[in-house]
Amino acid sequence: MVVASATPKRSEKLQGIELPIIDLSGERSEISKLIVKACEDYGFFKVINHGVHQEIIARIEEESLNFFSKPVAEKQQAGPANPFGYGCKNIGFNGDIGEVEYLLLHNNPLSIAQTSKSISNDPTEFRSAVSCYIKAVRDLACEILDLMAEGLWVHDTSLFSNLIRDVDNDSLFRINHYPSPVLCKDNIRDTKIGFGEHSDPQILTLLRSNNVDGLQISLYDGVWIPVSPDPTAFCVNVGDVLQAMTNGRFVSVRHRALSNSYQSRMSMAFFGAPPLHAKIIAPPEMVTPDEPSLYKPFTWAEYKKTAFSLRLGESRLNLFRKS
Ligand code: GA4
């Protein structure tokens, strides 16, 4: 069965929307159409019946909770996240701050092995839990990218997925922990920005969280729409590179995470990225006389360098628009 909501009118969206929920056990051509529509309308959707085994998820969740429950001094030994490891409050290198602590890892096996040593007392177990999870979500991301290409009638249906299947892919894995805010005076809980507004620079992000809310997306400037948590689903979002490769047809939507809950929130994001040398250019099917190409060709290395040299909330893809 495929479940997807029709695009609500703007007024309905403002009253709180549910993202399209796409059942991946449905009929392939139907699913690919729904995915394309969701990426055009929202840049975000949820997938259910995604095939990632619960044991794989439970294993990395347990490892992550073990890590975050360690004393601060011990956690700091796995940091700073420069480039990989434990980070607390500091996001990126340009002064962005949030109420979040996190682990940032590269998906390269050697890098995982290296980073695991300082994260866990049992690095072999941690490394294995991370590798299994990354493999499962990367396969899922590839499957979704193939469905997107099919729905867009791109001739080479592996065009997008090949970028993250490449041995040199630059994908990242991030585990965020938003501690439950302490009670303020009068027992009022403060809403804090856990992770400030931004778009993801990569191709595709697959996010899952525990059953605690906090994720919001911005479909219209200044209007934040909460995304309800669902630990059984993956929340999928289009990144800047996919917006460029679809010539603006798919949108890389800004999102943020609040930490305003009575419980702590833990989320895990896989950011599927191309190899550094990969050229990012929309395929011919995405460019027509009516829709001429919007972006200059660039490599992922060029784009990444720009993204990491700017603030979190920057609209960096605009810098690559043709004038
Ligand atoms: C957003 C998506 C990923 O979490 C991330 C982030 C990265 C970081 O935390 O170091 C960035 C941010 C993210 C975009 C702009 C730059 C880089 C912080 C920042 C200010 C790991 C990524 O790849 O880009």
Image (tube, rainbow, N blue to C red):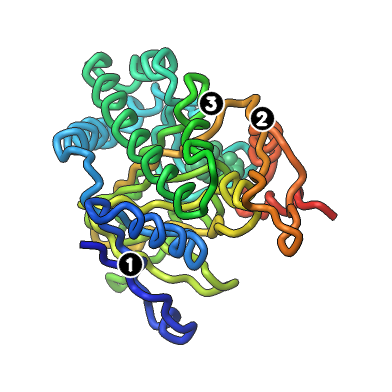
Q: CA distance from mark 1 to mark 2?
A: 42 Å
**What label does residue 189 carry, if any?**
1
Q: Quadrant of residue 241?
A: top right
Residue in the picture at 39% in, 16% down: 109
Q: Earlier in the sequence, mark 1 or mark 3?
A: 3
Q: Residue furthest bottom?
A: 11
Q: Residue furthest right?
A: 323
- Image quadrant holding the N terminus, namely bottom left
Instruction: Tell me the amino acid under the disc marked 2.
Output: Ala
Residue identified by numbered label 2: 301
SS at circle 3: loop
**Disc number lying in front (1 or 2):** 2
**Disc number lying in front (2 or 3):** 2
Q: Are marks 2 and 3 in contact (CB under 8 Å)?
A: no
Q: CA distance from mark 2 to mark 3?
A: 15 Å
Instruction: Tell me the amino acid under the disc marked 3.
Output: Pro
Q: Quick check: is the Cβ at mark 3 less than 8 Å away from ligand 1?
A: no
Q: Are marks 1 and 2 in contact (CB under 8 Å)?
A: no
The reply to whether residue 258 is visible in this rendering is no
Q: Is residue 179 above or below residue 215?
A: above
Residue identified by numbered label 3: 83
Closest to the observer, 251 or 180: 251
The reply to whether residue 73 is visible in this rendering is yes
Q: Quadrant of residue 249?
A: bottom right
